Image: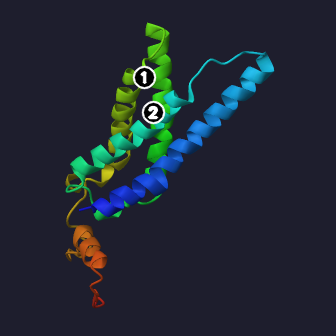
Amino acid sequence: MVSWRSIARGALTRFVPGVATVATVFEASLLLIAEIKGWRLRGNIGDLATIVLCLPAGYILTLALVRRQLHILANVEGRRSFVAGMAAMAAILIVLLLISMVTGKATPLVAAACAVVVGAATTFAIFYSHLRHRIAHLERTDNGELLVAVEEFAERASTHERITASPSQST
């Protein structure tokens, strides 16, 4: 099980920087292209801020819902959260572009709702492989000996118990 502290730390130190990275590259590219083409951009920085704030809400909501089933090896404070943030920002830009092409303009409420859903969906997609039902509990070696489950090892290691393994005797 993943702690609330890990979820919050992953959101603030990994997911949000991933979102900000893609948002910065997108905005810089857009401004550069507009400058070259001589376009005058109409936009509101508040729209981007709304999206950047709603994407982590989807991330936190998803991890809160699956935290009991999420394996400790998912490492929500690590690289996967950064990748989830980058994927979420790229996906919301594509979704909002498609909505704008169909309806003309995405309202801030629609953009916020889409951001929460896209943040949740990308987070679930990134962490799906680390749900408990997806991880094998026991493995067998060629000799037929049972190995310690990955789940038990992770739980013991997380509580700082010392695990000593006796070397197997082969004959």
Position of residue 127 measured from the top left corner of the image (x, y, whole percent): 34, 49
- Residue 77 in the image: above or below residue 95: below
Amino acid found under the numbered disc labelled 1: Pro
Q: Nearer the viewer, residue 39 or 154?
A: 39
User: Is residue 98 found left or right of 164 in the rendered image?
Assistant: right
Residue 40 in sight from this viewpoint = yes
Residue 171 in sight from this viewpoint = no
- Residue ranking furthest to the top: 103
Residue drawn where x is 29% and y is 44% of the image: 62
Position of residue 85 measured from the top left corner of the image (x, y, whole percent): 47, 44
Q: Residues within 10 Å of mark 1 (few under 14, many from 20)?
A: some
Q: Which disc number belongs to residue 170?
A: none
Q: Which quarter of the rendered picture does the N terminus lie within?
A: bottom left
Q: Nearer the viewer, residue 1 or 44?
A: 44
Amino acid found under the numbered disc labelled 2: Thr
Q: CA distance from mark 1 to mark 2?
A: 8 Å
Do callouts 1 and 2 mark residues in contact (Cβ within 8 Å)? yes
Q: Secondary structure at mark 2?
A: helix
- Residue 44 in the image: above or below residue 28: above
Q: Nearer the viewer, residue 113 or 137?
A: 113
Q: Secondary structure at mark 1?
A: helix
Q: Which disc number belongs to residue 50?
A: 2
Position of residue 147 measured from the top left corner of the image (x, y, whole percent): 23, 75
Q: How many marks?
A: 2
Position of residue 21 measured from the top left corner of the image (x, y, whole percent): 58, 44
Residue drawn where x is 36% and y is 56% of the image: 8
Residue tagged 1: 108
Dot 1 or dot 2: first in sequence order is 2
